[in-house]
Image (cartoon, helix red, strand yellow):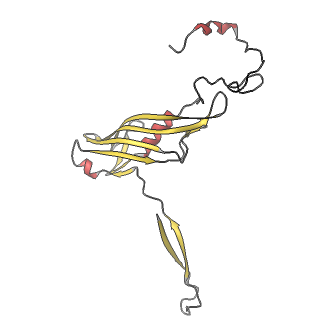
Amino acid sequence: MCVWLVRVQLSDPVTLNQSHPIGHIEQVTMSEPSKLRLHVGDLLKRFGSQRSISEAISLDDLSVGATRVPADAEIAIQLQLERISEGIVARGAVSARWASECARCLQPASGPMFISVDELFESEAVAGETYPLEGEILDLEPLIRDALVLELPQAPMCRVDCEGLCPECGIDRNLQTCTCAPEHLDPRWAALQSLDLDQ
C-alpha cells in the first residue's frame, strides 16, 4: 500500500511566490495490515461460534542454526477457530518447506513440514502454555512461528541414505568412490554394530 506525502519547506512565508518551491512530493510505502492479526469480537460473543482461516503467507527470521524457512517461501495455514469457555482455540495445520545444507555431505537440502496445531488463546495467557488474546484481537503469528521453528530439523539430510563425505579424503561418497581404508571402530563399541536401531 502506498501513500503520497507532501513535505513543505517554507524558508520565507511572507515573500513566498511562484519562484519559491513550496516543497516536494515523495512516495512512502506503508506496510500492509498483517493477515495474522484477526478481529474476533464476533466469536467472543457466543460460545461455540467458529471461523475458518485459510491463508498463504510468508515470514522472515524462521531458523534454527543453518536450517530455515526461506523468507519468500509460502506458508500454508488451515485453521479452525472456536470460542470456548477459556477463550478461543485454534486447531488445524501449518505447512511449509525448510532449506538447509545436508549434515552429512554439505550439499543443499530441503524438505516439507506439516504440523498439526491445537492451541488456546486467552486473556490471561500462561507463558509457554497458551497464547494471549488482546481484547478482541487474536494474533496468530507467534503460534505459526513456534510451530515451524520447533519442527525444523536439527540435523537435516539431503536424503535418507546419504553416504556423506569421506572422513579421510573428503570426497562426496554419493558421487564418487575412493580407496581410503575403512574407518577404524573402537572395539568397545563393536557390540553396537549388531543392533538394529530402526526397529
Q: Is residue 129 visible?
A: yes
Q: Which residue occupies the foreground of this view, 37 or 197?
A: 197
Q: Going 46% across and 43% down the picture, which residue do you hit?
A: 75
Residue 122, image x, y percentages: 32, 43
Residue 178, image x, y percentages: 76, 21
Q: Residue furthest left?
A: 46
State which quadrant residue 118 falls in. top left
State which quadrant residue 188 falls in. top right
Q: Going 21% across and 46% down the picture, which residue do you hit?
A: 46
Residue 99 vs 155, above or below: the answer is below
Q: Which residue occupies the foreground of this view, 67 or 180?
A: 180
Residue 99 vs 6, above or below: the answer is above
Q: Going 22% across and 43% down the picture, which residue do you hit?
A: 47
Q: Is residue 65 visible?
A: no
Residue 52 vs 189, above or below: the answer is below
Residue 18 vs 154, above or below: the answer is below
State which quadrant residue 187 falls in. top right
Say left or right for 86 vs 156: left
Say left or right for 176 vs 148: right
In this rendering, the count of numbered labels is 0
Residue 151, image x, y percentages: 49, 33
Q: Going 40% across and 45% down the picture, which residue do you hit?
A: 140
